[in-house]
Amino acid sequence: MLALAPPAGVSLRSAPSLLVDHAGAESNTCVGLARLGLQTAWVSRLGTDAAGDRILAAIRAEGVDTGWVERDEQRPTGLMLKDPDAGVRYYRRESAASAIGPALLERVPVSEARAVLVTGVTALIGADAQAAGLALLDRARGLRIVDPNLRAGLWGSDRRAALVRPFVEHCDLLLCGASEIAEVLSTADVDDPEALARLASACGPREVVVRGAATIGALAEGAWWDLDIRRDTAVDPIGAGDAFNAGYVAVRLGGGTVDAALRAGARCGAAVTTAISDTEGFPRNLRF
């Protein structure tokens, strides 16, 4: 999406100018992984408009392969508006990305990828998009990664747990917030991350990371690791989860331990909160 936001500390109602940026859970994670030195590709759809041109150029400049991004002459590029007073508002109905479907994947070498990632946002922007997410997971032969990323204000938000649960059931590595996975699993117990992880693991994923308010924990090979975190004052917390995911996945794909991956993810997530942009604060050339 194109992302518009007022300067830090300024209301949208009175801002004399807005920051123009790009955003999106999967693309944010791709940018983070590329900055950490991994070869990444982003598969999506954009309108044949100036917003689409800008996004494509920005993501290409990060070193992300955009060769499988399709342009739509009929539908516009989606938009996210950040309002410090009212939160995030999405304008994605009938957007180019909402019409992404399994057919787009036919020319993508999904089975050759070491890992694929899709988030619940894809399941919530349209029926075809949800089908495309499931097709990606079904065709993958590498590590299948899912972040539920439950969001309000989208096409499928009123059915979000039901639409996202199939993604959870078809993944190997689940990266989730405590409240999100509790909603998907229909449990009210959000205060025990380990119990949530074990409950989620019973649905299919063999490794589960749960991000809580004060701790981040991971269940892998039956063992539980956790890391206490400090949440400093954030300029903008949006994108922190995607940045965490990039740091965690980079370490795990590199053969690193769960503990090292948790620390890397926390470091990347904290860095992103220092800027209004979802990706500007992500570290470059970071070594763990």
Image (cartoon, helix red, strand yellow):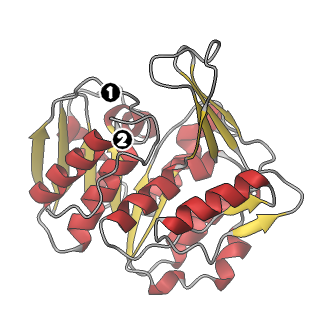
Q: Which mark is residue 234?
A: 1
Q: Is residue 166 left or right of residue 77?
A: left
Secondary-structure class at tag 2: helix
Comparing 132 with 41, the one in front is: 41
At horizontal 26% and vertical 72% (from top left) the residue drawn is 253
> In the current view of this chain or complex, which residue is farthest to the front?
16
- The kind of residue tagged 2 is Ala
Q: Would you identify the image quadrant in which residue 58 lies?
A: bottom right
At horizontal 18% and vertical 44% (from top left) the residue drawn is 217
Q: Would residue 112 be visible to someone looking at this image?
A: yes
Q: Would residue 172 be visible to someone looking at this image?
A: no
Q: Pick the quarter of the image with the C terminus.
A: bottom left
Q: Earlier in the sequence, mark 1 or mark 2?
A: 1
At horizontal 53% and vertical 75% (from top left) the residue drawn is 65
Q: Do the residues bearing badges 1 and 2 touch, measured as CB atoms within 8 Å?
A: yes
Q: Would you identify the image quadrant in which residue 278 lies?
A: top left
Q: Which mark is residue 128?
A: none
Q: Is residue 141 above or below residue 218?
A: below
Residue 260 x/y as whole percent: 11, 58
Between the C-alphas of marks 1 and 2, the distance is: 10 Å
Number of residues whose C-alpha sits closer than 10 Å to that of mark 1, classed few (under 14), some (14–19) or many (20 or more): some
Q: Nearer the viewer, mark 1 or mark 2?
A: 1
Secondary-structure class at tag 1: loop
Q: Would you identify the image quadrant in which residue 196 lies?
A: top left
Q: Is residue 208 above or below residue 111?
A: above
Residue 29 x/y as whole percent: 42, 57
Q: Which mark is residue 240?
A: 2
